[in-house]
Amino acid sequence: MRGLYLWTVVKITEQIFGSQYSLIVKKAVVHPEDLAEKWFKMRGWKPFPYQQEVWKSFLNGKNGLVNAPTGSGKTYSLLIPALLETAAGKSKTAVSIIWLSPVRALARQILQVAEGLIEDFELPLKAALRTGDTPAKDRKIQMQSPPDLLITTPESLHQWMANPKTNLYLLSLRTIIVDEWHELASSKRGVQTELAISWLSDLNPQLKIWAISATIGRVDQSLEILLGSSQKASKAIVIKSTLTKEILIETLLPEDIFELPWAGHIGLKMLQKVAEKILSSRSTLVFTNTRAQCEIWYQRLLEFMPGLAGNMAMHHSSIDEHIRHWVEEALHNGTLRVVVCTSSLDLGVDFRPVDLIIQIGGAKGVGRFMQRAGRSGHRPGMPSRICFVPTHAIELVEAAALRQAVNTGLQENHLPHIRSFDVLVQFMMTLAVGGGFFPDKLFQIVRSTHSYRSVTPEEWKQLVNILIQGGNALESYEEYHRASKDKEGKIRVLNKWIARRHLMAIGTITGDQSFVIKYRNGKKIGTVEEWFITHLKPGDVFWFAGRALELGSVSGNKVLVTKSNAKQAKVPAWMGGRMPLSSMMSKGIRNKLQQMREGDHSDAESRALMPLLKIQSERSAIPALDEFLIEYYESREGFHLLAYPFEGRLVHEGLAALLASRIASKIAVTFSIAMNDYGFELLSDRDWEPEKNFVQEIFSSSGLENDIQATLDKTSLAKRKFRDIAMISGLLFRGFPGREKKERHLQSSASLLYDVFYDYDPDHLLFRQAHEEVNTFQLEEARLRQALQRIQNQHWILKRPGKFTPLALPIIADRLRERLSSEKIEDRLRRMLNHQK
């Protein structure tokens, strides 16, 4: 484009000869904003006012945040001006723009968009992708010749920062753009992003920092986290689109509510109705909440509709990247009709042909539901269509609450991670590997972030000590001496083995040890967790990536398989895959139950639930907003107390453990605990007279911190959390590829370290962090405290139903699922119902 070249000539002329010489071609200059508008016009589009405002603000040197609905062109609002500005002042050996993406699928999409823009504008620029999927040869090319635009993830950016050579390529960085900031800001990956931005800002004081988000609650807080302080945030600009995205929500309802099970989480009773929806749509994404659920639904849909063979695929994070890439490309090109997926396709990817989303089970959050809905109608002005499929009858309450929240425009606020010392220690190691750092200077950089602004000089000394010798309790063990201080006072890692080990472990996503599934010819299919493989023997058949695979042998971390024609097979499961109910959804469900109790059946979900709610009311009660329902049963298993705060799985886990501990301190009784998003169960082998002992005083928030600490000491919650912290900080190492440590060895090592700190160094920052994270994010202490106060002020209703109620059965089913195969659960529940008094 001639105008761009002239504009570029002006900029180069100014740099070489001075601004006065550029007057020769001044009249021929075309401003970048005009070029952007011409490009839109060439494609038959018209830019939205918010896009024009972003172009202007960006080119004027502002920092900011773009908040606009899914499918409204947020990517173009920042990518176009960033590329045009870079073309005007191109540096030959430096990265000018970093585009951070939370997921690899979205990063690949951004690369395609960027390459299209570079071609259309005829820019002398190069864009490149660097993620965990990037081949080694491409990484080598990037090392030798850096791209102008680097599209990457937080983990891969930190790996880039760990190389002294690539660090030099960042010295002229102009812009960093964080995509889907709401997804990162409330996680440790967001903390990684904060640290990278702070470090890059120190290298480049004029660095422009922008973020993009479609679904975000507190914009002011998000901007402050991005930029590090309220002072910087106050000088930045928030540009909100006035566009609204219409979301058409339909709940798939059974002909008879009793067709739906009272308990469960798979939802296959609705298989036929889901199939009918798929067949009536041109293209569909079927979202599930777990990878195991994804595998099951894919297989059952294929069995039900064999004609979709070749037109249906599966996508989740454990499937090999080559298969995932193929699915994404096929979706984008319109050659696939159906994809069954998980959160791996939640974010931002532009799949033009998709016109329907099906959500299996509750999405557990308004933002997540809206994000998934936005995968359809991914164009300005196009409505998004989503079908909610209940997996059990009571989930219809959640469906009705979701609809109400979406229609009123409510958004969740997520807690940011504060003082995540494991991420900070990892970052310090990254810099120590990448050439070293001076502690005093880095301390100021770290303190400029939102997450670490409260770190004291004494805590900083402890962190440096952890890096050098593991902390006071580990100073005698050489394996924890990872870095050292040179004669100039710089902290560096000189041991190549330690440096290599660190590079292999960069990241904050932890999980159980994974085994690689391969055919005998070496072709990789994906990964599955160790605990699942240990329950198989050679000859067993399991489903994976839509295929029946027969286990041949296990060697190291490699699982060799062959294809099988078996019709029955086991389904892999992954630990920690179930999402908790958000606080907004909790309130929505309580409000919806109140409306149903008052006779408001204006929505289809409420009308469908009427017969089931009648049973609940006849056997027990439907709790009002100012009531707390408790049910007490006797069965062959023992004595069941079920309570319904409707606060979400994580809060109920903490609440049940806390109450069980408080009750056990008064009377001699032992409980087993179960919970779901609606309530919790305390099961005992003796009648402990809840009318006398389950009293309001045990719900007191007084002394809560001490009681939580006592509960943590009695349970493994803190130890499990410490295992993740130890791995992120580098105190634990999984092992090199092909030589990974067994999961039980990792857990044993983590437990040993935890006990050492408990006995000899209780002030160790990583040890303290484990307890703080359990309190804040697992037990959700603030939300737990609010729940205790609310319950104390409610009117208590204690019922002794003769039979389990519709509210009780899902909780009991969750407990049985931990011990029984899915084939046995329904039989077991049926026997329990038949033998109740």
Image (cartoon, grey):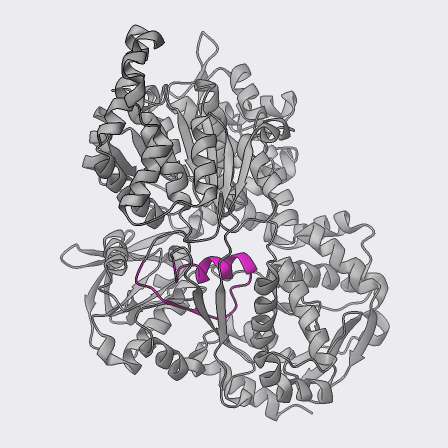
**Can you say which quadrant of the picture contains the C terminus?**
bottom right
Out of 622 and 526, give the one closest to the viewer: 622
On the image, the x and y values in percent for residue 289 come to: 45, 64
Specify the quadrant of the image occupied by residue 288. bottom left
Please identify the quarter of the rendering in which residue 771 is found: top right
Residue beneath the point at 53% across and 22% down: 445
Q: Is residue 330 above or below residue 397?
A: above
Q: Where residue 439 appears, x then y in whole percent? A: 52, 17
Can you see residue 595? Answer: yes
Q: Position of residue 694 (x, y in %)?
A: 81, 70
Q: Is residue 362 magenta?
A: yes
Q: Does 142 lie within the magenta span?
A: no
Left or right: 314 in relation to 184:
left
Q: Quadrant of the N terminus?
A: top left
Relative to 781, is 460 on the left or the right?
left
**Residue at x 56% of width, y 30% of height:** 236
Magenta-tinted stretch? 352-378
Q: Is residue 601 above or below residue 163?
A: below
Total numbered labels? 0
In the picture as drawn, the residue positioned furthest to the front comes out as 27
The image quarter containing residue 162 is top left
Q: Which residue is at a point 48% across and 10% down the rendered structure image?
A: 489
* Nearer the observer, 683 or 230: 230
- Residue 377 at x, y = what percent? 39, 61
Can residue 159 be seen by looking at this rendering? no
- Tell me if residue 822 comes above or below residue 704 in the rendering: below
Residue in view at x 59 percent, y 71 percent:
398
